Image: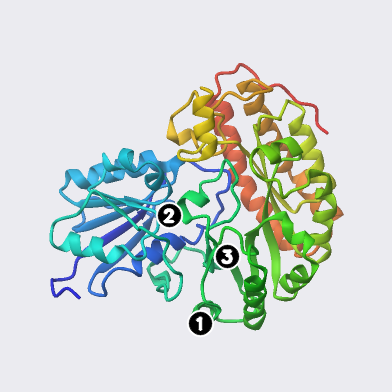
């Protein structure tokens, strides 16, 4: 441990002022990444977390070190913050998804770029920082073992971080190889799990009473069935209501579904991506059979678990009929909380590599990589048809009439939770629709697609 005087550190989650994304909520989402990072600093360091969605960065305060995390769609803002601090002589480290995928680009705005996970390499960075010899890049040679990872510094979050739900991480990595996804690049293809007793211990420190909401930040909570079973037993004991990401494959495992239900699962986030088998096959989702989807959805809903279903428009098999078909599917199957997005070739993904080779990417403005803008030329429709179709579908499913129809005709479990969630997301979705239609589309008028 260093005996130098305490250093002041600022960790920043950047946001463009006034710009909403389609998955924004009224209350800021718990930022697990920065609270985990904060826990790795020596005890003598004075660490502060700023989420620009709710508070402003003060550039004139005395700071020794700034760490900024960056998603692709807000990376320009991250760079701008980094440049301002560096012009004041403050050391800046960039990390997170985008800098990990494009470290050379990020390095132009930082003293150091942290690639991938911080655990296992962070002590070296601190040592170099203290001796004034920061390296340009830091990257772990192997994926860290999740045993004994320190507990997130949740105490550092602004009080406005609505305590509506607590967030926890139990696993990392994803064994699937979806072409458009950067998870295997950032968190690895090997599925790593935290010891169950450590998860249990962490829950004891954050769950105060039965019935609290818990959000799992994992990429796929059910990838390892025996581990998931043990996890669900812990959730049951703590009496939480929980939400997590998984794949539709959980519908094939009724025993696990029943355990999830009994342990307080109220909602599963499932990436359906597409209703067309050729699309699913082409992006390495061979394990999904498009014809079985309705039956699988019913199976999950019969276990009183709601579905947060995600669909992507713009795959090579999509033509202009895909929007109406998808909206009809969502409404007919009463998917409690649907979200639509535009296929986006994020840097570093196999999808981006393929589209570059096919010379189909025409927009490299990172702020458009928010999954609401079309940045490539689709195969079976025009750019305008894809952009307008997405906006129409998004507008249709977040109309109050559509929301109520899905929830009232559907299984009705956790009705108020899903009603609130739909209306919370609706605000941000309408904001995005308005912004793209009014300010950014060079089209005279929007085609009024027939309502299904």
> Between tags 1 and 2, which lies in front?
1
Query: Could you tell me how far apart the alpha carbons at marks 3 and 1 are, in whole angstroms?
Result: 15 Å
Instruction: Work out whether mark 2 precedes mark 3 in sequence or the reverse, and give the earlier one.
Output: 2
Query: Could you tell me how far apart the alpha carbons at marks 2 and 3 are, in whole angstroms?
Result: 23 Å
Quarter in which the N terminus is drawn: bottom left
Residue 446, above or below 198: above
SS for callout 2: loop
Q: State the residue at coordinates (79%, 50%).
A: 404
SS for callout 1: helix
> Between tags 2 and 3, which lies in front?
3
Q: Which residue is mark 3?
A: 216
Instruction: Work out whether mark 3 precedes mark 1 in sequence or the reverse, and give the earlier one.
Output: 1
Instruction: Say left or right for 302 vs 50.
Output: right
Residue 81, above or below 261: above
Residue 388, above or below 273: above
Q: Is residue 147 visible?
A: yes
Q: State the residue at coordinates (30%, 45%).
A: 81
Q: Which residue is mark 1?
A: 201
SS for callout 3: strand
Q: Residues within 10 Å of mark 2 (few under 14, many from 20)?
A: few
Instruction: Work out whether mark 1 precedes mark 2 in sequence or the reverse, and give the earlier one.
Output: 2
Q: Which residue is mark 2?
A: 54
Residue 425 position, x and y percent, is 62, 49
Residue 445 is labelled as none
Q: State the residue at coordinates (58%, 23%).
A: 377
Residue 367 position, x and y percent, is 45, 35
Residue 46 position, x and y percent, is 25, 68
Q: Quadrant of residue 108?
A: top left
């Amino acid at each position: 441990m260093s005996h130098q005087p305490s250093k002041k550190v600022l960790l920043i989650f950047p946001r463009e002022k006034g710009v909403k994304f389609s998955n924004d909520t009224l209350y800021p989402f718990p930022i697990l990444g920065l609270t985990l990072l904060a826990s790795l600093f020596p005890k003598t360091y004075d660490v502060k977390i700023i989420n620009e969605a709710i508070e402003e960065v003060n550039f004139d305060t005395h700071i020794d070190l700034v760490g900024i995390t960056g998603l692709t769609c807000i990376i320009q803002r991250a760079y701008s913050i980094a440049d301002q601090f560096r012009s004041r002589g403050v050391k800046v480290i960039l990390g997170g998804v985008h800098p990990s995928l494009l470290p050379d680009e990020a390095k132009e705005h930082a003293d150091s770029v942290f690639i991938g996970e911080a655990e296992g390499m962070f002590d070296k960075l601190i040592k170099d920082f203290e001796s004034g010899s920061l390296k340009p890049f830091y990257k772990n040679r192997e994926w860290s073992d999740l045993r004994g990872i320190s507990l997130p510094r949740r105490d550092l979050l602004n009080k406005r971080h609505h305590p509506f739900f607590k967030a926890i991480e139990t696993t990392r990595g994803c064994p699937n190889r979806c072409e458009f996804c950067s998870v295997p690049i950032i968190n690895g293809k090997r599925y790593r799990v935290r010891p169950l007793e450590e998860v249990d211990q962490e829950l004891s420190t954050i769950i105060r009473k039965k019935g609290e909401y818990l959000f799992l930040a994992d990429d796929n909570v059910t990838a390892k069935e025996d581990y998931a079973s043990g996890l669900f037993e812990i959730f049951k004991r703590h009496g939480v209501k929980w939400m997590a990401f998984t794949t539709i494959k959980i519908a094939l495992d009724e025993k696990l579904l029943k355990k999830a239900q009994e342990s307080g699962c109220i909602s599963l986030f499932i990436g359906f991506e597409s209703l067309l088998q050729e699309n699913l096959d082409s992006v390495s989702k061979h394990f999904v059979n498009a014809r079985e989807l309705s039956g699988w959805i019913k199976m999950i809903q019969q276990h009183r678990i709601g579905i947060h279903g995600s669909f992507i428009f713009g795959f090579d098999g999509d033509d202009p009929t895909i929007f109406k078909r998808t909206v009809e599917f969502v409404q007919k199957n009463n998917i409690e909380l649907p979200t639509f997005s535009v296929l986006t070739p994020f840097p570093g993904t196999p999808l981006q590599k393929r589209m570059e080779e096919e010379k189909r990417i025409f927009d490299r403005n990172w702020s458009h990589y928010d999954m609401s803008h079309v940045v490539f030329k689709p195969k079976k429709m025009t750019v305008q048809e894809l952009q307008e179709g997405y906006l129409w579908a998004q507008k249709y499913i977040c109309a109050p009439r559509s929301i109520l129809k899905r929830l009232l005709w559907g299984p009705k479990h956790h009705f108020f939770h899903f009603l609130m969630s739909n209306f919370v997301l609706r605000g941000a979705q309408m904001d995005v629709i308005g912004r793209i239609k009014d300010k950014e589309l060079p089209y005279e008028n929007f085609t009024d697609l027939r309502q299904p």
